[in-house]
Image (cartoon, rainbow, N blue to C red):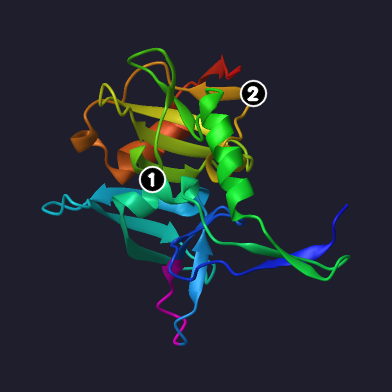
Amino acid sequence: MLTGSVFGVDNEQMYDTLRASYRFHCPRNPGGELTRVRLSAFRRLERLPGAAHPAVYRVTYDCACGEAHQGLVTHADLDYGPLAPVEIEFRNLLTGRSEPVGDELAEIARSEVQRGNWPWRLYCSREARLKPVWPSSLAMVAPAQERSDEFIGVAVTCPSCGAVSLNLVSGAHLDVPFYHDRIVRYVDRPFGDARDLTVDAFHHQLHSARFDAERADLL
């Protein structure tokens, strides 16, 4: 097993490939250091009107400081950042050499997609099947604390039919691209139009609805 450290990540990259997290500013950090936010810590995503090239999303997220903050992220950073090639070097402490690993990570992502293993998949109740989705497809996210600390509730908008569905997944299912729960739990009916989705309605459905299960045998 190699022993070493990773450095040389482009600070302008909003997505941290190695830590599978986005970088946002924390208002409580006067030094301007960015804080890492995983998808499972997102709480609400809203596309802002007007901007189209690129589209801009407002993200409400739970920060490591203990408060909820808002940040802006472009469509490209939100959806394509986890798949974009980055310049990263690995300091191998056994050999004392710096070894680039960015191309290797990009090749792994490319090969997974070619095999049909999309980074994120969630269940669409209207189409009655697991669908490939993007991070921008997540309308709301919340811990399902009344059910289990292991579950995250997700209101997801299907990229093809536009229906909003409610899923229960693990944090890793959201946070780690290309990792998928063997079982995805869902409400077997569409929530309705995204315009009807409110925080209160989302939490009511999350803690009162009956969830079915779908095996996520992807390959």
Disc 2 marks a residue whose amino acid type is Arg
Select label 2 or label 1 by which is in front: 1
Q: Which mark is residue 182?
A: 2
Q: Residue at x 84, y 61 (%)?
A: 3
Q: Which residue is mark 1?
A: 79
Cα–Cα gap, marks 2 and 1: 23 Å
The residue carrying pointer 2 sits among few (fewer than 14), some (14 to 19) or many (20 or more) residues within 10 Å by Cα, namely few
Q: Nearer the viewer, residue 87 or 117?
A: 87
Looking at the rendered structure, the kind of residue marked 1 is Asp
Residue 180 in percent (x, y) is at 60, 30
Q: Is residue 195 magenta?
A: no
Q: Determine whether 8 is above or below 78 in the image.
A: below
Q: Is residue 83 left or right of residue 126?
A: right
Range shown magenta: 24-30
Do the residues bearing badges 2 and 1 touch, measured as CB atoms within 8 Å? no
- Residue 161 x, y percent position in the rendering: 26, 21
Above or below: residue 122 compared with residue 109: above
Residue 27, visible in the rendered structure: yes
Q: Is residue 146 visible?
A: no
- At horizontal 37% and vertical 33% (from top left) the residue drawn is 156
Residue at the (58%, 32%) spot, across then down? 111
Q: Is residue 136 above or below residue 54?
A: above
